[in-house]
Amino acid sequence: MQPGQKAVVKKVHGEGNLRQRILDMGILRGTELEMIKKAPLGDPIEFKVKGYDLSLRQSEASLVEVEVRK
């Protein structure tokens, strides 16, 4: 994804505490999110999810499978 793009969450991969942490932040299947910005070195990445801003590490974001909206 690029800043300004919107997407819908298709699946959250991973297991255990990390997966549960992502789900607890509101990143659930069917949720729409928008990439706001990516830090200069690519980590962290800021998203808008359910009306609030959320920063994820690259390693966390890579576990979220999305379908980008055009």
Image (cartoon, rainbow, N blue to C red):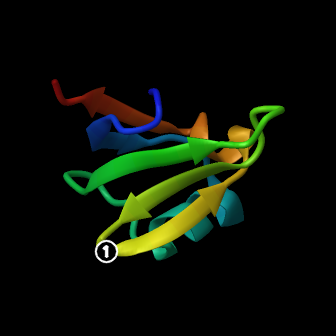
Residue name at image x 18 percent, y 30 percent: 69
* Residue at x 73%, y 40% (from the top left corner): 59
Amino acid on which disc 1 is placed: Gly
Q: What is the count of numbered marks?
A: 1
Mark 1 Cα shell of 10 Å, populated few (<14), some (14-19), many (≥20): few
* Along the line of sight, the residue nearer the viewer: 14 or 67: 67
Q: Which of 36 and 25 is in front in this view?
A: 36
Which residue: 46% across, 28% down?
Answer: 2
Q: Quadrant of the C terminus?
A: top left
Taking the image as shown, residue 6 lies to the left or right of residue 37, namely left
Which residue shows up at 39% across the image and 70% down it? 26
Pinpoint residue 9: horizontal percent, then vertical percent.
Answer: 30, 44
Residue 31 location, quadrant: bottom left
Left or right relative to 42: residue 7? left
Q: Is mark 1 on a helix, strand or loop?
A: loop
Q: Residue 10 at what x, y percent from top left?
A: 28, 39
Residue 25 point in image, percent of width and height: 49, 73
Residue 56, by quadrant, is: bottom right
What is the quadrant of the N terminus in the image?
top left
44 lies above or below 70: below
Q: Mark 1 points at which residue?
A: 51
Q: Which quadrant would residue 22 be assigned to in this image?
A: bottom right
**Residue lying furthest right in this view?**
41
**Which is more toward the observer, 13 or 36?**
36
